[in-house]
Image (cartoon, rainbow, N blue to C red):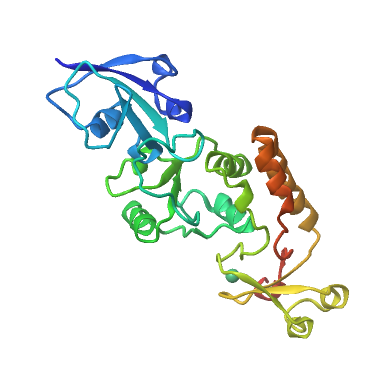
Amino acid sequence: MPQAEFRFYEELNDYLPPALRKRSFVRAFDGTPAVKDVIEAVGVPHTEVDLILVDGRSVGFAHRLRGGERVAVYPVFERLDIRPLLRLRPRPLRVTRFVADVHLGTLARYLRLLGFDTVYRNDLDDPQLVRISVNERRVLLTRDVGLLKHGALTHGYWLRSTAPRRQLAEVIDALSLRREIRPFTRCMRCNGELRVIPRAAAKGRVPEHVYRRSRRFVQCADCGNVYWRGTHFQRLERLVRELRSSRRRRERPRDARQGHSRRDGVPALRRASHDRS
Ligand SMILES: [Zn+2]
């Protein structure tokens, strides 16, 4: 039976049984399979793969293995500088957008808080999630590895963590998104964009004491909710700061300096209580 030697890099090792992680191992196969099929048979979804080197030459997913090759497999996204080589995707998603599976409601709200366009509904089944991801060019977020192996899918990310705040840090980190954070520009409830409204327009839509105290109000363009700087604003600001600083420690100094020059978006946190009982 023909066989090839495989080595997976960086977080792709998370998909492998411990004995195969971070080292070369031999894999046997029948006939002349596409390299993509052998990689997925080992357990790694193709959506996580951005570069495959066969005997030092970059190849596409359809490349046929014949036996005797050395195969190196690298993860999606910007962890490694692989620009001179053939990437499996001709261009990255221009604007990073997400669709989150039904178990990731809290993560979806966190992502919206940071300004990332994130589709989430608790009634979407797997085929719907895949369709939204492909049609709207959204990165599919899930804890279900099997879902990422869906053939039509091109962009997906498997969350290692189960805790929403850790998941948020994981996504920001894995996709190098720190510089794209635009806090408090998107409605946490419905994903609509927030825009500043004249103070007078908030009268009657927020509690009277809030209206008297607050100068600045924003409203969701989609659901109409009015937000203002509430008591948990500081807690959320601290979360944003933590995410940015944890990235700063890991990234190159050049990136860190650029991170300081960007202004935050509209600060707005409390949701109007008119829809609460
Ligand atoms: Zn909204």
- Where does residue 45 sit, x and y in percent of width and height? 35, 36
The part of the image, by quadrant, that contains residue 165 is top right
The part of the image, by quadrant, that contains residue 19 is top left
Quarter in which the C terminus is drawn? bottom right
- Where does residue 188 sit, x and y in percent of width and height? 61, 62
Q: Quadrant of ligand 1?
A: bottom right
Q: Is residue 232 visible?
A: no
The part of the image, by quadrant, that contains residue 191 is bottom right
Identify the residue at image location x=70%, y=55%.
Answer: 262
Residue 33 horizontal side relative to residue 9, left or right: left
Quarter in which the N terminus is drawn? top left
Q: Is residue 51 visible?
A: yes
Residue 147 horizontal side relative to residue 105, left or right: left
Q: Disc count in the image?
A: 0
Q: From what the image shows, is residue 59 above or below residue 2?
A: below
Residue 227 horizontal side relative to residue 129, left or right: right
Of 109 and 221, the residue lying toward us: 221
Residue 186 horizontal side relative to residue 47, left or right: right
Of 92 and 226, the residue lying toward us: 92
- Where does residue 180 sit, x and y in percent of width and height? 60, 53
* Extreme residue in the left direction: 31
Q: From what the image shows, is residue 272 above or below residue 170?
A: below
Of 99 and 10, the residue lying toward us: 10
Identify the residue at image location x=48%, y=48%.
Answer: 103
Q: From what the image shows, is residue 122 above or below residue 12?
A: below
* Extreme residue in the front direction: 84
- Where does residue 190 sit, x and y in percent of width and height? 55, 66
